[in-house]
Amino acid sequence: MMRKIRFLLILPCFSVLLTGCWDRTEINDNAYVVASGVDKGEKNKVRFSVQIPLPSSLGGAGSSGGGGGTSGEGPTLITQGTGRNIREGMEDIQIRLSRKLYFAHRRVIIIGEDLAKDGILEVVRAVFMQPQSRLSTYLAISKGDAVKLLESQPRMEQFSAEAIREMAKASSNRTVMDVLQDLQRPGKDPIVPVIDTTGTLKEDDKGKEVVMRQFAVLKQDKLSFFTNEKETQGILWLLGKMKKKSFTFSTMENKEITLQIIDNHVKTDLSMEAGKPVFELKIRATGTMLENEPNLRIEDPKTYYMIIRKMEKEIETNVNQILRHSLSEGIDFYGFGWHLYKNRYQRWEKEWKKDWERLLPQLKVKVNVDGDIQRRMNSGKVEKG
């Protein structure tokens, strides 16, 4: 009996040692940021923008989710703050919101074109320093201001952040971590996908949709140039990102063949000629036939090898075009210098590191393409040899 009484007397004391949820944050207290944009402001300031889904607008008709009413205003809140740095711009937004900004679910970060010309390093560092931010967040550079991309309203998705995330994933899959690593690697310059507004139809200039069809090539952390169509495809070949994408090339005048690429990888070989590094890029490209506009008989060996030569020549042309352009600007986006750093470290430190940018325009790079068409999807109506 006495043992039971002692136990009952001691039990309340244990409750003092138990921890409670004194520091909990309710879901309704957070404003979940799914995308943010950073633009150049006036007088050395930055403009920081966020896109926040509004729960009451995402549940469809009759929804009674948390948050204030947003009838007629769309499913997201776009708001912008100004500051001397990103954190100050963020606080400028926070003082005007009833909920606390929460960045753990951010899908994409967009850097405005003008700010990118001045440098993206501070933006990337700010993401790295913020505990809530994920380094797997996709990074893009906008044509014009980043905020206009957040304000776009793609028809296929509820908000633009989701559309941009899907496009970035299908394009080059460049994350904050990828760009941050490139900025820290010797002999390596980063590339970032370019996002712009467009219409559902090409002639539609309302700008509700988004499009990702270029790359921003940076010199160190500053935007140097945007790629054209052929240069963009050349970058995708070099990154090994053409898999599951279509590739069209001409075989005769106004007659094209379209393939779906099922394999794309690149091997880098290094040799020395007269004491200078020479690189050979061996690109493997395998595809299946999607369209055979000239109706060529691919089963015929002579015809098959003619098509393969055309395919290889087109790939080689696209790759050489972006390499010539970037190397002539003293830009090493492929990482030839990084390859030397890893494989010829002593010589890199003594001979090449200091003057690498100056040496790039004279760097010898050979491109060797090995193409293959494994199977065809259509036979063609008229067969030609």
Image (cartoon, rainbow, N blue to C red):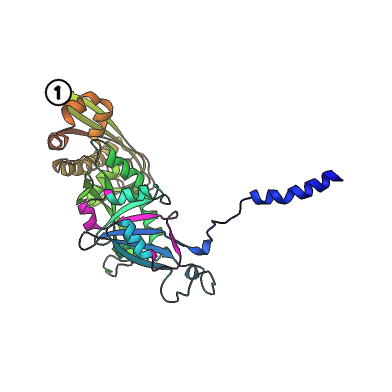
Question: The disc labelled 1 sits on which kind of residue?
Answer: Gly
Q: Residue 198: where, in percent of width, then height? A: 29, 64
Quadrant hosting residue 203: bottom left
Between 119 and 7, the residue placed more toward the observer is 7
Residue 262 appears in the picture as rendered: yes
Front residue of this view, candidates 257 and 231? 231
Number of residue marks:
1
Name the residue: 20% across, 53% down. 117
Q: Which residue ends up furthest to the right in the rendered image?
A: 1
Q: Is residue 19 left or right of residue 368?
A: right
**For the C terminus, which image quadrant?**
top left
In the rendered structure, the answer to whether residue 67 lies left or right of residue 311 reads right
In-front residue for pair 353/41: 41
Question: Can residue 380 be seen from the camera position used here?
Answer: no
Q: Is residue 205 above or below residue 236?
A: below
105 falls in the magenta region: yes
Q: Secondary structure at mark 1?
A: loop
Q: Crowding at label 1, few (<14), some or many (≥20) Cα neighbours within 10 Å?
A: few
Q: Residue at x 22, y 33 (%)?
A: 337
Q: Which residue range is magenta in the image?
A: 94-121
Inspect the magenta stretch and tell me whether residue 103 lies in it. yes
Q: Position of residue 315 (x, y in %)?
A: 25, 42
The residue sitting at 78% across, 49% down in the picture is: 8
Vertical order, 199 against 358 (above or below): below
Query: Foreground: 63 or 5?
Result: 5
Residue with the mark numbered 1? 275
